[in-house]
Amino acid sequence: MHRDIARLVQGVSVFAITALLSSAAIAADVTKQRLENADGDPDNWITWGQNYSSHRFSRLAQINRNNVGNLKVAFSMPLTNSLDGIPTNTGNLEMTPLVDDGALYLNSAFGLHYKIDVSRGNSAKVVWRTDLQVNKETEKRHYVRGMAMWGDNVYSNMVDGRVASVLRSTGEVAWEKQIARTKLGYTNLPGGPNEQHFIIGEFFSAAPIAVEGKILVGQSGGDWGTRGWLAAVDATNGNELWRSYTIPAPGEPGHETWKDTNNAWRTGGGSLWTTGSYDAQQRVTIWGTANPVPMFDPSFRPGDNLYTNSVMAWDIDTGKVKWFFQYTPNESWDFDEQGVHLLYDAEIGGKSQKVVGHFGRNGFFYQLDRTNGQFINANQYTYDLNWTAGIDPKTGKPLEYDPGKLLQTYLPTTRVDRGRGQVLFCPNFLGGVRWQPTAYSPSTKTVYGAGHEGCSSISTAPEAPVGPAGGNPKGPGAVFQAQGTNSPTAPGAYTAGSITAIDVTTGKQVAKVRLAYPNLSGVTVTAGGLVFTGNADGWVVAYDDRTLAPLWSFFAGNAFKAPPISYAVGGKQYIAIVAGGGAVSDKDRGTLERDAQLWVFSL
């Protein structure tokens, strides 16, 4: 008879099922060799992006275009307890499960970690559940996006700024360390959407990655009045090895691009809230950075605002920046470029190149040389785009960019700035592809991106306050209310979604499908010729990877904000995805379940 055993480990509550109840094999340690050769191990999914290059490409082909119509539910498992009484419509379940040797690992926004035995194929059982007890009363950031594996441990960073290591075999906590300073930011002022007046600052939402005994974590709280940074901690004990900021301090390279007298760099943003990639050959980790802050007030922060809206490559041993490329200097539309940066090799213009590809939130798909950050090409992929006339084919900068100007104007009629009144711009302030995981198929030489379509109408305030130590003193809600107010029903404003396929040899679109709602889940592509996603209206869908024609769908009744994965046990392929955590719009909240649920499908 199944029985939970309660115990205390290092002050952390752990619920474990006895070892006799689990038939999952004892997994081999996750090593440098396994991670660098993850493509050769398609039965398992041992890092957030499937491999270090973030391809999210499964080499499993048992489920394919010809038989996907026969896909059915293998099992589903409720994860409602992962929210422990917090209304799930205030939380976002955006995690990528990890799978190794018949065991699936999940974490929740509130510090719960699960090991689930999926080795039976058509059923699942919880092996252990470890609670790292994130404070549910004060934490308002209800989202995490996954974990990392190294050795016999899983690693997570939590919204309260801790990084933790949990033994896969037992669920015991090996160590936990406070790495991010959650009280660094400024208090929200009255009148914003956050009613409580508490201080919010640095935190984590992006899944970590494990590289050669280091756990890489990106600070996610840029909009909360902080500077972004990337840190490496020792996998054995959690000690911080190095930290590199994305907003340079006085005397550091790039600080000269903050030309204000407000000390705007102190609260300059540039956070890293989507997991980066790793180039083992170059020994660099490559991450995108978010917008400058305040987001809708470039007059507060004249200059290019390095290294916001950029891609950066860090040496994994020293934390030194090897190269960078800035997409939109002095940006003012909240076009973060922290999204996934795919690493692949491609024949471009008759030349073999090592490429980093990125679906920009600003509406363009970019390809750069990943050895040095040099621009290769860029093409528009969103339906609507009006903030620039295009990208300079030589520099990769917007055509209107003038390096001699303190304030960029781009296309003046759509430029958001202090006191501009109502401005309509496209894509809307959510993008484009936001954080949603993108994918690359070596079979089709195609990249796939899912996200938002639309235009925003923003009204800006005439003044910007300065904090007591410089920088902008307000939290995210207050910044949004004071500096820019969104009017979603204004003429021309709309929100929809899409999935786009782009040929990497040309950088141009080969297929596209429009969606009624923004896609919040991202995509996974398989060797069976399929692109899988979960939609915000409750449907799981498989598309043809050549045409993006839908081939199969299943209504789960939960909103999807998490990406799918694929794994195999006993020679059989499965598709897994987590659902729940809110609906796409108010009118759907009555028709979609908000409980957390793990869905697994097979033939």
Image (spheres, rainbow, N blue to C red):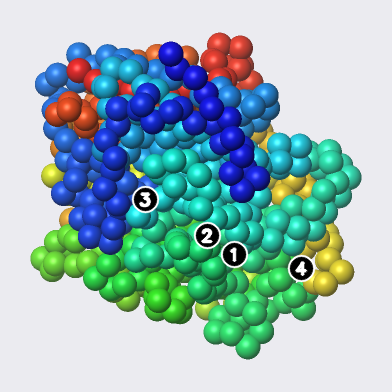
Q: Earlier in the sequence, mark 1 or mark 3?
A: 3
In percent of width and height, residue 108 lies at: 54, 37
Which of the image's four quarters has the N terminus? top left
N-term-proximal mark, 4 vs 1:
1
> Can residue 223 be seen at all in this image of the molecule?
yes
Question: Residue 443: percent from the left, percent from the top?
Answer: 13, 44
The span from disc 2 to disc 3 (Cα, nearest Å) is 23 Å
Local crowd size for mark 1, using a 10 Å CA cut-off: few (<14), some (14–19), many (≥20): many
Q: List the residue tagged with mark 1.
A: 228
Which amino acid type is shown beneath numbered disc 2?
A: Gly
Calculate the distance from the C-alpha at mark 4 to the C-alpha at mark 1: 14 Å
Residue tagged by mark 3? 152
Amino acid found under the numbered disc labelled 3 = Asp
**Type of residue at label 4?**
Gly
Kindly check if marks 3 and 4 are in contact, taking CB atoms under 8 A apart as contact.
no
Residue 471 disc label: 4
Looking at the image, is 168 positioned above or below residue 150? above
Q: Is label 1 in contact with label 2 (beta carbons under 8 Å)?
A: yes
Reading the chain from its start, which is encountered first: label 1 or label 2? 2
Secondary structure at badge 1 equals loop
Quadrant position of the C terminus in the picture: top left
Query: As shown in the figure, which amino acid type bears the numbered disc 1?
Result: Gly
Disc 3 on helix, strand or loop?
A: loop
What residue did someone put label 2 on? 218
Q: Secondary structure at mark 4?
A: loop
Residue 459 horizontal side relative to residue 197, left or right: left
Q: CA distance from mark 1 to mark 2?
A: 8 Å
Measured Cα–Cα span from mark 1 to mark 3: 30 Å
Q: Residue at x 14, y 61 (%)?
A: 347
Discs 4, 2 touching: Cβ within 8 Å: no
